[in-house]
């Protein structure tokens, strides 16, 4: 059995194994809960009833008070605003404002965000409640086995030593919840509302279930355009990622050659292209390829007719220009990345290969490329997703065109451009969110599949 | 296990009881709201600061500073101070206003202002109380009128009329224009009076210069300017009495296909640059260099043309003398630039009316109304004209100024200016329209000849209407 096949099977095994282990993990987790429920004594029951009470009965004053205060704080939050926020999450408002008379109404969007926050707070509270019960049960176990329960002081000391990861991660986790999870959940939930079009606050937004998805799937005009754009989007994402990656790698290898004089000088040129804001580069290229631009000027001066590089008829010319311009913008970053990684390759490998009589191409295929792919697959995936969702390229190069046979799109538009035309341009935020969700599912499936079958996952130990 | 489960249930029950009881009280308390009240009571608020959003030109030319100083002086006894809102001229009140970030008084185009009415972000104004009320025409007010329920409201006070104008170089006219190009002997060259002669002259220039010079040049894919050709033959943007019925898209209505034919014909005396925005970008320098004889654009860019002519080596005096700005030429009734037999008709152009509106979120509505009244007074509009070169919506100022100002004012009254519909859906018009216009130009310049018959033009325009309709309605409702 060859190595690739073995790696493939290993990767598949790991992937399948992960999902197979889930019920086992859940069972294990549940058995812990079952143990607490069956073995917990009166003090555990006290803590289950009122947080911190069991700890107080065990004379763990500090911990008991902290849990009690947290419960009271949660109640206070819910009484003051949480209940209203949670209620608002389901209704999304009942009173429409009227700014003419200074009547302040409900802002459905704010209510949705605050509702999500209230739910996060409930999840947070449940997590604290569980830790409160676990903690008191741990104390019960310690007492039952005649050991001294851990002192609060030593537990706090542990947070700076053995359990320091908890301390270090607490703030980032809260940050991720508020600044990442909350907006993502918000975006997902928007897909299930009628937010957008004429329904923008102060008008009240409503929950509409799966209507937006049904609309996308059932509208006859969408299907042909969707598949045409999706097909081109895939070609674009694969080609542009490949071009940027291999050209960047090639450039890095070229500039790594010992024979190249003034490496810093040559490396500065691509970095300049990288440093200029993308949209300025794009507008510059748009001008260069326009009828009045310098390229057509020279073409016409040479006695040829002007070329429609980006106009109505320029389907493939415009697509190729898009690929080239994207390469111009993106190759430098890959080159910089590759330059850094190449400097870490063990030169003995090449020396050994040369002794064995391997050609330069063989060395590239067998040493450089596998190493690069191993080290950069996650970056490659992020580049693929970035290219898949590359809004700017065709928006700036060839925006403002609808071509024959496409529904509200041109033949160079990517899904993200089409999404923009249909939703944001029209303020249909809910439809935009629904399409985003579909794009997210597509890109995440592709990314996951690529990652699982990549050397970074299959040959995790190879370069360690 | 029963004991622990009971404790768990007890915890949940306690929490729910406390939260539901006290939380419900909180919800009830937050539902109590004031009924609101009429804002324009006539009583000026005292010691307030008004944030005024004006356009960049008014700031740059010093008009805003003059206006603020004069207003503040007049209302100092009330402690009312108007200040520059220091915001982008296109600031979206809808986004910032409800959260307290918007201006109190804003000056924007009618389509921008009127989109705020949907969320009641601007106040309906008691316009009868304003000094300018009797001096503004029906069509100017109409641009700021909207119906809620059965009631009609006016939300803005018109100040400035925007319409496309023809810019041309008088010194590039042929020497013999008075004898050969002035059939009606009215002292105005025929090529700037009607499109048929402008087309003929443009072809002549191209021929004589061997293709290096052009007569009339314009990016034909610019929907704002191109739409006039369709309007002139019965086309419209949206139907309905107020022109806001988005279910009725009307670019293909009437005999608008004649407008499409004219666009295609005009392209034949230009080059492929007319299918994109190159000409719009280069018009200033190319008119200055004499490469173009004429172009069409809005009145506010006059100084840019002058600047380019000075850069091209002319004195400012010479530039002012020879750069002419006039209303757009007349169109042939036949819809054929080579057929004058059926006579000429006025060209209807898309235009707009810029004006003042009052934010619903202002803390001082009466003071804001006083500001609008002051800023639209005869003296201030007259001064605005002098400093900024606007075309006033006030008929008394327009009459006093005479010339082009008076003509533009009359054009609005006559309906020759098709005021941009004040609806959000207008944003969906431009892409289909500019694509079709570019296709028309491309059709003749690349000799595809797909648009030759009237039927082909009609089908093309029907497709534009469909695309606009789809863009607005497919995902709505």
Image (cartoon, coloured by chain):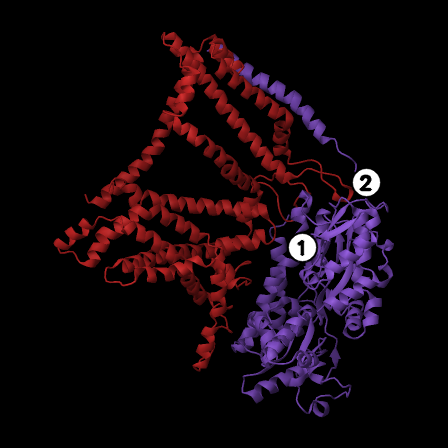
Chain colours: A red, B purple
Q: Nearer the viewer's eye, disc 2 or disc 1?
A: 2
Q: Is residue B338 left or right of residue B270?
A: right
Q: Residue at x 43, y 14 (%)?
A: A137
**To which chain does the residue with label 1 belong?**
B
Disc 1 crowd, CA 10 A, few/some/many (<14, 14-19, 20+): many
Q: Is residue B357 above or below residue B223?
A: above
Q: Say whether residue A378 is visible.
A: yes
Instruction: Tell me which residue sits at (72%, 40%) in the image.
Output: A97
Q: Position of residue A354 (x, y in %)?
A: 15, 55
**Left or right: residue B414 compared with residue B235:** right
Q: Quadrant of the C terminus of chain A?
A: top left
Q: Which residue appears at 84% of the width and 71% of the height? A: B400
Crowdedness near tag 2: few (<14), some (14–19) or many (≥20) residues, C-alpha within 10 Å:
few
Tell me which residue sits at (47%, 18%) in the image: A132
Disc 2 secondary structure class: loop
The residue under label 1 is B424
Image location of residue B303, percent across then percent down: 66, 71
Q: Is residue A359 left or right of residue A374?
A: left
Question: Which sits in the foreground, A414 or B202?
Answer: B202
In depth, the one of A28 and B476 nearer the eye is A28
- Residue A295 image point, x, y percent: 45, 73
Q: Which residue is mark 2?
A: B37
Dot 2 or dot 1, earlier in sequence: 2
Question: What distance separates the C-alpha of mark 2 from that of mark 1?
Answer: 28 Å
Seen in the picture, residue B201 relative to A239 is either above or below; the reply is: below
The N terminus of chain A: image quadrant: top left
Which quadrant of the structure image shows residue B330?
bottom right
Total labels: the figure holds: 2
For residue B257, say whether it is visible.
no
The tag on residue A137 is: none
Residue A115 locus on image (x, y percent): 59, 33
Work out whether A130 lies above or below B180: above
């Amino acid at each position: 059995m060859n190595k690739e096949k073995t790696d493939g099977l290993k990767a598949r095994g790991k992937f399948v194994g992960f999902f197979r282990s889930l019920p086992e993990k859940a069972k294990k987790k549940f058995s812990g809960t079952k143990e607490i429920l069956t073995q917990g004594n009166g003090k555990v029951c006290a803590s289950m009833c009122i947080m911190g009470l069991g700890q107080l009965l065990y004379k763990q004053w500090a911990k008991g008070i902290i849990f009690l205060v947290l419960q009271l704080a949660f109640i206070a939050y819910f009484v003051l605003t949480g209940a209203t926020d949670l209620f608002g999450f389901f209704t999304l408002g009942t009173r429409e404002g009227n700014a003419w008379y200074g009547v302040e109404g409900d802002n459905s969007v704010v209510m949705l965000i605050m509702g999500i926050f209230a739910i996060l707070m409930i999840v947070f509270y449940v997590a604290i409640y569980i830790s409160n019960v676990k903690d008191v049960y741990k104390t019960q176990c310690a007492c039952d086995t005649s050991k001294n329960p851990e002192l609060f002081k030593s537990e706090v000391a542990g947070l700076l030593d053995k359990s320091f990861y908890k301390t270090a991660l607490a703030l980032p986790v809260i940050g991720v919840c508020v600044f990442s999870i909350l907006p993502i959940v918000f975006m997902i939930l928007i897909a299930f509302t009628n937010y957008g079009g004429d329904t923008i606050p102060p008008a009240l937004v409503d929950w509409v279930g799966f209507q937006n998805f049904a609309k996308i799937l059932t509208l006859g005009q969408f299907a042909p355009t969707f598949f045409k754009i999706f097909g081109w989007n895939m070609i674009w994402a694969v080609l542009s990622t490949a071009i940027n990656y291999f050209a960047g790698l090639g450039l890095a290898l070229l500039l790594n050659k010992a024979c190249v004089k003034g490496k810093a000088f040559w490396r500065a040129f691509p970095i300049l292209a990288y440093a200029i804001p993308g949209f300025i580069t794009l507008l510059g290229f748009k001008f260069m390829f326009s009828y009045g631009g310098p390229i057509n000027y020279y073409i016409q001066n040479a006695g040829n007719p002007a070329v429609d590089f980006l106009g109505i008829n320029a389907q493939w010319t415009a697509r190729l220009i898009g690929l080239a311009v994207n390469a111009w913008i993106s190759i430098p970053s890959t080159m910089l990345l590759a330059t850094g990684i190449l400097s870490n390759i063990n030169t003995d490998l090449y020396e050994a290969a040369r002794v064995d009589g391997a050609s330069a191409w063989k060395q590239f295929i067998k040493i450089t490329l596998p190493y690069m792919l191993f080290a950069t697959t996650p970056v490659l995936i992020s580049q693929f997703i970035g290219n898949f969702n590359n809004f700017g390229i065709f928006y700036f190069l060839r925006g403002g065109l609808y071509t024959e046979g496409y529904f509200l799109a041109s033949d160079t538009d990517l899904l993200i451009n089409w999404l923009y035309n249909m939703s944001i341009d029209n303020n249909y935020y809910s439809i935009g969110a629904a399409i985003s969700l579909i794009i997210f599912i597509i890109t995440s499936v592709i990314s996951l599949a690529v990652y699982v079958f990549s050397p970074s996952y299959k040959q995790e130990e190879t370069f360690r | 296990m029963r004991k622990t489960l009971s404790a768990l249930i007890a915890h949940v029950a306690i929490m729910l009881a406390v939260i539901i009881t006290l939380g419900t009280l909180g919800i009830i308390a937050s539902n109590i709201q004031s009924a609101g009240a009429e804002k324009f009571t006539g009583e000026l608020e005292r010691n307030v600061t008004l944030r005024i959003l004006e356009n960049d030109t008014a700031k740059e030319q010093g008009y805003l500073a003059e206006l603020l100083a004069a207003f503040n002086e007049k209302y100092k006894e009330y402690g009312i101070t108007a200040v520059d809102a220091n915001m982008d001229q296109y600031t979206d009140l809808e986004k910032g206003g409800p959260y307290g970030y918007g201006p109190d008084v804003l000056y924007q185009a009618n389509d921008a202002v009127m989109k705020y009415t949907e969320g009641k972000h601007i106040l309906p104004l008691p316009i009868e109380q304003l000094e300018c009320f009797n001096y503004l025409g029906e069509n100017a007010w109409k641009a700021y009128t909207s119906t809620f329920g059965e009631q009609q409201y006016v939300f803005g006070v018109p100040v400035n009329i925007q319409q496309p104008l023809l810019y041309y170089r008088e010194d590039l006219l042929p020497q013999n224009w008075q004898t050969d190009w002035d059939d009606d002997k009215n002292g105005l060259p025929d090529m700037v009076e009607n499109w048929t002669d402008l087309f003929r002259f443009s072809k002549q220039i191209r021929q004589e210069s061997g293709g290096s010079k052009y007569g009339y040049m314009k990016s034909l894919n610019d929907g704002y300017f191109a739409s006039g050709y369709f309007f002139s033959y019965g086309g419209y943007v949206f139907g309905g009495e107020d022109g806001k019925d988005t279910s009725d898209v009307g670019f293909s209505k009437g005999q608008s296909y004649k407008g499409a034919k004219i666009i295609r014909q005009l392209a034949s005396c230009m080059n492929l640059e007319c299918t994109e925005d190159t000409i719009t970008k280069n018009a200033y320098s190319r008119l200055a260099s004499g490469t173009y004889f004429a172009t069409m654009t809005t009145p506010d860019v006059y100084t840019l043309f002058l600047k380019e002519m000075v850069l091209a080596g002319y004195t400012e005096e010479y530039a002012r003398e020879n750069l002419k700005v006039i209303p757009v030429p007349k169109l042939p009734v036949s819809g054929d630039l080579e057929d004058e037999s059926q006579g000429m008709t006025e060209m209807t152009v898309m235009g707009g009316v810029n004006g003042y509106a009052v934010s619903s979120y202002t803390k001082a509505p009466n003071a804001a109304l006083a500001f609008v009244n002051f800023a639209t007074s005869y003296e201030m509009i007259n001064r605005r004209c002098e400093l900024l070169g606007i075309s006033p919506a006030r008929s008394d100022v327009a009459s006093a100024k005479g010339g082009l100002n008076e003509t533009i004012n009359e054009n609005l009254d006559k309906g020759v200016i098709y005021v941009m519909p004040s609806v959000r859906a207008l944003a969906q018009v431009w892409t289909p329209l500019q694509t079709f216009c570019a296709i028309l130009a491309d059709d003749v310049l690349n000799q595809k000849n797909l648009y030759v018959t009237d039927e082909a033009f009609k089908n093309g325009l029907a497709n534009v209407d469909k695309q606009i309709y789809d863009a607005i309605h497919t995902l709505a409702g």
